[in-house]
Each structure stands twice: as C-alpha cells, then as structure tokens.
Image (spheres, coloured by chain):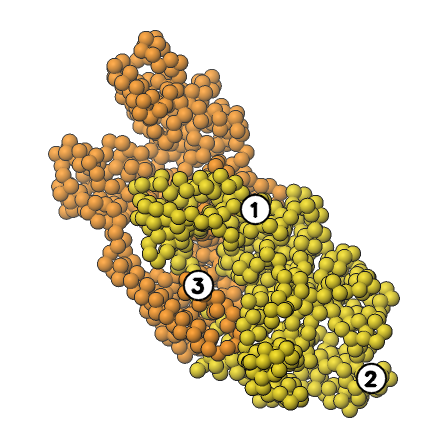
Amino acid sequence: MEENRAEWLSHLSNEIVSDAHGNLLDAYVVALEGWRRGLTLRWHVKDSEKFKEMRTWFVDKPGQLFSLTSKDRTHYFFRTRGDKVTNEAVDIGRDKEKTKQALLKKGVSVPEGKQFTEEASNEEIVDYTSHLGFPVVIKPTDGSFGRGVISNITSSGEFEHSLEYVRGNLGYQDVIVEQYIPGKEYRIYVVGDKVVGAMNRIPPNVTADGINSIKALIEIKNEERGLNPRLVSCPILVNEEVEDFIGRKGYTLDTIPEKGLHVALSEKTNISIGGDPIDALDELPEYVKEASVKALHAVPGLEHGAVDLIVHQDNSNVYIIELNPTAQLGGLLYPIQGKSRDIPKAIIDYYFPETKGINTAEVNTFFDFHDVLDPLQSRDAFVTTVTPCPQEKLFTKKYIVSGDVLDIGYHRGLRKQAFERFLHGYIMTLEEGDIEVVVGGTDPEMVDDFKNGFWEDEERGQVIEIQVEDYYEPIKVGFEIKTDLKTQIEDLKMYKQELEATERELKKAELKRRKYYSSLSWKATMPIRLVGSITKKFKN
Amino acid sequence: MNYEHNWLPELEGTVPKEAYGYALSNYTIAYEAWRRGLSITFENLYHNKGMYYPIYSIYNNDNKVQFTHTRPHLVSKDAVDICVNKQRTRETLDAHNVPVPKGRLLKSLAFDQVKKQISDLSFPLVIKPLAGAGGRGVITGIDSFDELMENIQYLTEKLNYHQIIVEEYITGEDYRAFVIGDKVVGAFRRLPPHVIGDGKSTIRELLKKKNKFRVNIPGTYDMKVLINEEIKRELNKQNLTLKSIPEKDQFVRLKTKNNVSSGGDPIDATHELSEDLKENLVKAVQAIPGLIQGGVDVIYDKESGRYAILEINTKPSIRNHLYPIKGNAHEIPKSIIDYYFPETKGKYLSETTPKYYFDYSFVKEYLQNNRLKKFTLPTHPYEPNLISKLITFQSDHELAKLKQMIRTNFHKLKFNGEMNLISTDQYEIILAGNYQDVEQFIDFLKSKKFISNVQNEHYQGGVRVGYSFNYKPSEEETVTDAEGTSSLSPIEEKDILASIEEKDKRIKELENEIIQLKNSKSWTVTAPLRKLSKKLNK
C-alpha cells in the first residue's frame, strides 16, 4: 500500500490521539487545537452550564462536551459542533425532509423525492415511485451509518421487494424515496464561507501483491487500519456478503489475484464497514465548492458542518444528499490516501479569529485525556479545567539516571524541581533499577539545568551516572511519577475499567444477537451475525 | 482518652482521609458552603516559582469569594502586610489601645546600642524575628543582658534573622482565638505533650495508645508524638522512664514545648476568655484596616486577668478549633460562610437529604501534579424522597462483572455512594438515592442467583457523592511500634499481600483474555484491550 501513503498532521499524531476513541476523537481534536492556542479548556458533564440548552445526545459518557474561553468570551462545543450553530439548524439537519425543504427554498438541487410516514401504504409509495421514474434510492427517514439504505433500484419489482424489506424486516416505517443520482459521492466540510476539507469514500477494497490471498490481504489491510486513529475501530469484515460480492467476479477468499489488481469487496462506501476515506480537496472543482457553501447556508444558523453530495456522472450537476451539523472529522484528518486537512484549525479560527496567528503545527504538547475525564466519569467533578498549554515549542530531554535512585521521596523532590523550572514530563522506573526522567519546557536552559537537580538530594538519591538524550516525542502537561504505587493502582483501575467497557459491549452484542439472529434474512442480519461470530470466538 | 469532647456532628463520617491535616481548613470551609448548595471550584494557581499553590472559590450566583487556606481575597493586601510584620502589628494595635507587650524593634544589634534600646524594659524578655512564622526563632524567658546578647547572636548567625524584636515577657498561657467581624468564634490553648496514667500501662504503652488516637483525628493525624531524646530527658527530670507505670489519672508531661505539631494537645478555651479580653480581640482585628478576620495570638493569665496580644495570623489553620482534645468544637466554617454569604445562613440542603460529602483525593491526583488547572465540584444533591442505606451481601461472582453491574445501576438510578469489598466474598454498599429506586435496587440484588444474604439497614453516616469502589478489609489496624513510628500490623500486611496477589492474578487473567482476543482477529470489540496489552508489556 506504499503508493497510498497518506500525509497526516504531525501535531495530531497517532500517539497524541491514542486515548481518544470513537466519537471522543472528534471532540478531542477540536478541544486540543483551542487549548494549544492558549484558550482555557474545560470539560463538562451533561447539562452543565450552557449545555442545558444546546442540542446534544448520548452524552452520559464524558469527553464530548467542552468549552473554550478567551479573555472576553466562552464558546461551548458538542463534539465538533460549536454554539454558533443554532438548535434550529441542528433540528433541520437531523430531519432529512426539513433539510430538503430548506435547500429547495434556496434553489439548491436535491434528488427529487418524497418522505412517507407510517400512515402511507406500500401501494401509495410504489405508485409514487413509478411516477418518479427509475432508478431510485430508498432510505429510512432517521437511519444512520447507511443502515437500511438501498440504492440504484432499477425496477418496480425490485422496489417492492426493497420496500418490504426496509419497512417490514428492518421495521423502518418512515421512509424516503428519491431519484438515484449516479456519480461520485463527496463529504465536504464547510466552515463559514470556506470549504476546508473534502473526501471521497470508496467501498472496502484491497490491492493485490501477487503473493497473498484475498483473505490475507484483508488481514494485512486491517493491520494498517489499526494504525489509523479513525479506522482502528472499523476493520474490513470478512463475511458472507463479501464472499458473495467477490464471488460474482469469480473470486473466493483464497484466490491470489494478480499483482497490482484492485479488488473491491463491497458496494457500500461506509467507513464503518471498511470503506476507505480518500482526501479529495485538491481535485474538487470550484463550482462544487461553491455549491456546498451555498447548501450549508441554506439552513439559517448552520455556520459550519458537513455536506454530503453527489456530482452527477453525466451532466456534472451537484445534488445535495444530506447536511450534518455534528459531523465526524476522522476521515478528513486521517485519510487512507492524500493529505490530512486541518479542520480543527478552521473551526477554532472561526470561533476565535483573534487567535488565528498562533501556529500550533509545531506544538508537541498534549494533555492526559484519562485524567481529565475520570473525575467526570465517577462524578467527582462537574467541570475539569485542563492545565494551560505552554505557548511555545517545548525543548525536551530524556535523562537516564543510574544509582540508588528508587526512593519515592527522591522522585517527589524531582517533581518539585521540575515545577520550579516550569517543566513538564514524567519519571519512570526502568527494570534495571535506573530511572528515566523526561522533562520539557519552553526555556532550553531550564531543561538543561534540571540535570543539576539530580545531585541535590543526596539523602534520598545517590546518583552514579546520568545519560542525556534529546527527546522528540510529544509530552503531556503536568508531571507524572509513574513509579508511584498510587499511579500503578490507578493504571490497574484503568485497565479494569477498559475491560469492563469491553465486557459491557460484549453483553450488548449478545443481547442483540439473541433478539435478531433467527428471525431475519441474511441481508438484514449481516452486521449482527458478525457480532455474533465475534462473541463465539470470545467464548472459546 | 480521659477527656470529654464534643466535636461537630456534621463532620462525623464526612471528612475523607485525604482532607486530614493541613487540608482540613480548606475542606471544612468548602464543605460548609457546599452543604448550603453553593458552587465550589478548587484551583492550582501554580505560581511562586511554579510551586503548587492551592486556592478555592465559593460562588453564590454573582457573589464569589476566593480563599487562600482560610483567608478570603476580601482581606486587603495592606492588612496582610501589616500582620506579617510583627512590629507594625504591635504599633497599630498599640495606637488603638489594644494591650501589647512593651517592646520594640531593635534598630541596631550592636552591644551598646542594644543596651540603650532596652533600658526601659524589664527582664525577663522575649526576642523574636520581625517576620518569623510558626514560632520559629522565638526565644522566651531571657533573664539577663548577657543571655539576651547570646540569643541575639544565635538568631543572627544560626537562623539568619537580622531584624529582631525584643519585648517584655508576660506570664500566662498562649491562646489562639479566631475572630471574624465583631465576634470571637472560638479559642483554644495547648497542653504540652503528655500522657495520662491508667494505673496499668507503661508510659511507652500510653504513648502508643495516644498516637493511635491522634492518627484517627482529622486535626492531628499527621502529628504523632515521636519518642526522642527530648522526651527521655524530660522524663528523667521527673525521675521516670518509658517503662514507668504512672498512677491512674496522673498527668505525665513529655516535653516542655507545647505547640501542637510537636505533640501538644489543643483544648477548647473559649469559655476561659474574659469579656474584656474578647472585646480587645475583636478590637485588635478591627484595628488593622481591611483585615475582617484572623487568628489572634494572645498571652493570657486567667488568674490575674492580664493579657497582651502578640500577633495576628491572616490565614490561621482552624483544625485545632474543630478537633480539641477536650471541650467543644467551634463552628468556624459556619461563621465564615455566614459572614460572606449571609443570604445562605441556616439554609442547608443537607438537613433534608442524606449526609453527603465530597471526595478530596482530586487534589493529589489531578491538581498537585498539574494535570488539571481547576476542578469544579458536583453540586450537593437535592431532591425529594432521598434515603440512605447500608447494604451487605455475599457473592463469589467475578469482581469485574459485579462492579460493572453495580456501577451501571448507580448511574442509571442516580445513586451516590460506594461499594466496598470487605473480604473475599463479602461486600458492602453505602448509597443514597430515591427511596423507591433503592427498594427496587435491593430487590434486584436479591433476584440475582450469584448474590446471597442481602441485608440492608438505614444508614446515618456520610455518603460520598459519585461512585467509587474500594478494597476495605475490615480488620485493618494501624499500630505504632516501639519508637512511635507507624508500621504495618501482621493482619494488614497479610491483607495487602493478598490484595497484591489478587491483582496479579487478575492481570494474568487479563493477559490471557487479551491473547484470546488477539487470536479472535475481531476488531471493534477489542480496541481498548489491545491498548491494555501494550501497557502491560511495558
């Protein structure tokens, strides 16, 4: 996959975002950008301060609600969406029909179609569709993640079958039927009047190397996806549907395709099922950009957000499919191909234009996400305020200190020395009984001077030798003594929490499986059966 | 112990271990405000050369008062400057006719000059540094000019103090009074470190007992009486040794110094103050412009009624007022909050709810290491029909699963409290929540086949807000060894080792699970565990 090597942002490296899983990633990257510009970053529990009024959902788990404060004002954010986006705009964005009405009112093209509530009979819908003309798409009114979306339906027979499936089997009574627009699909992120990112999603695929089977190629690709902060939780799934799909081209999972051949594994483009996000900003024609900006602003109060659109393959017309006021940024930040686009920067520029000049691309500081969220999770705090980010690049050194240096009092003394010099970092005990001390600060003299501190506490630490190395990894604000028994117990607690979370997810999966497994056709249950097979493997 | 004392009922079971000692003042003041429904934020100002510097703010809508230890920001900088300077304090008080010892700041330390400057003072004298703190460098009972010069030399050469105050020694005992507005809210004096005989135990045994008592009191837990040469000498003077068995009720003095930190005991002395003295204590605070409140040190002779005010502390610790070894505790936190938030006077949410309190470990875990800048407490829970229960049960179900189940229920039912593991299969849950939800929760526990012997009773003790799990072996016991320092009891040691063993086992289990998960090649569910394995391999 070397030819596909993407360029990611170094100030949002894998290590920096490694504690921010799933939808926490979005909030984290925006918060981090604001914090690095010197804004005060606070994390909130549900319903705290302005969040009482803002539209939010699934926020029992902390890490999605934060606020940024400058000298004269505070802005509140739910994931990537700030308080400049009005509740009315959010409500419109969540309702596909209302979105469409708003777009049409402003003369923006959308696929022609109609929304039906549960009162509408199947006959009524079929009748409408035959007037609309084929091909069409059918989708649930409030579905997400591509669930229940069936596109490119070319005949009324096929349509009737699909309708039955979506309304009957899947139980989505409220559906939308609209024209199918053939062409390339884009997700575009707009802030104010600017398009700041665009990606194209392509269905799960592998590129053959002439050596490995398709099955092995998928595994290799999943390994790679595991290194991508956005895709780590979205591997390509190997299942009947995939087998069925490649089977149509005469392949099996054991086939070793010819070197260089791209093998598509599905027709769905969703990233969550293994699709690839590909950066497309540079290839995007100006008129498409203009159309996306116009589309976003068709909804009053929607000052930034994502626009999903299709550029028709024949006439190059732009059709808007959906607006998303609370969009995920992962795919735009961590594309599998192309350049990473700094959406968090654009969002913070928009909310705090006075901080525009502050370049955070060089900043190598971040904060411990667990420490910030744990007190909110256990409800020991309503709000936590992160220690301010040092406003310049940190110079960092790593000291390996040998001798009689394991006294915890000695380590605490070193922490004091670090704070006196305005340094951040940590102390960690190495297996051989040495200690590793990493300190970073904006003043290189202070960082070098710290070395003298090692010798100053002879009662508690007898130093024999100190090795100094330059250190280029990012570091967290504050100073952690990793050898502290307390810290170790905290770590253990964290591991256990993670295990608990995993077990919880497993339980949920089992429940779902029990509920759906036997009753539904294979197409409907595909994702659930997959979870089921994972469960089985757990038990072994 | 043989003394009678009445401590504040609201602090019974509501002061977490992390708030013991010096932190007690901060905690109890914040707690008082919190019980009235006020908002509280703790902050690490991180100045003074980058050192940890805690402050906390209390809010009632637009009324915000920020405290450094016990001092609100409303106390003026000038007032603090005057109080730090003992000479200026004395001059200011003197100008307002508040009795102070006769004396002055020495303008020159030369032999002849000193002689001239003290010509109108009569021995015995006291010398002290102009800006010393905590009794450092205070030398009393100087009976001759030679002795005076010797001690001045000691202060300049050994302790590096060059501005020295000399004053007449007043007979009497040291008292500390807390004054706010026009009220003396409480006063204590200190007994020297001592033990009281029971007719059976040796002095060593009595001291051991005493230390055990002290470590369990929030006010003195970090101040054990350590056996040292000073004690041995003092006993020697009384023809005693550590092995002597004093008679029942015999008072055995262990040291001559009597500050609390070296083992002296605070006793409530509010009732000992004369009305005249109280008036002057208030006058003293009011004499300093912008002071509002303070801890006034006074030397007072009960018999003759004579007294002189020595100095005023702008951020005195209030721990000794709260936990006197004898007498009544005084509600300093209440007076403070009443004064700055008069609109909340008597309006406690906690009087109609279970006895909630908040955790204090965040200071160490998040503020001191500078991970967080500020920490905003949850507000005091308040809703109708709350009830508090202690539930016990047995279960040999897997700990992680049990914890998860309880935690989920706590979250869902909006309970506050904790789950404690008492022994291998014995658990207790302390909780507060809506009474119907609590009943439902108890039924839920009873319905589980892997849980047995579910008992519950009404609970009067403190309930921590939030949810926590603790490993709390019931036979935990701290004893002091022969030298008065703490060590682990065999039972405790066994428990800790058992706990470590248990944790090791759990880690093994986790590791195994990780291997299985890795082999399963499934992704979605395993992401967090993959990270865990990385950590464990470190």
Tell me if mark 1 has few (under 14), some (14-19) or many (20+) residues whose alpha carbon lies within 10 angstroms of its own: some
Q: Earlier in the sequence, mark 1 or mark 2?
A: 2
Q: Where is residue B471 in the image (x, y as percent from the top left)?
A: 36, 62
Q: Mark 3 points at which residue?
A: B535
Q: Position of residue B27 (x, y in %)?
A: 45, 46
Q: The yellow chain is which one?
A: A
Disc 3 chain ID: B
Q: Quadrant of the N terminus of chain A?
A: bottom right
Q: Distance between the residues labelled 1 and 2?
A: 59 Å
Q: Is mark 1 on a helix, strand or loop?
A: loop
Q: Name the residue under label 1.
A: A393
Q: Which chain is orange?
A: B
Q: Are marks 2 and 3 in contact (CB under 8 Å)?
A: no
Q: Which amino acid does label 1 sit on?
A: Lys
Tell me if mark 2 has few (under 14), some (14-19) or many (20+) residues whose alpha carbon lies within 10 angstroms of its own: some
Disc 2 chain ID: A
Q: Distance between the residues labelled 2 and 3?
A: 55 Å
Which residue is drawn at the image coordinates 17% and 36% (left, top)?
B232
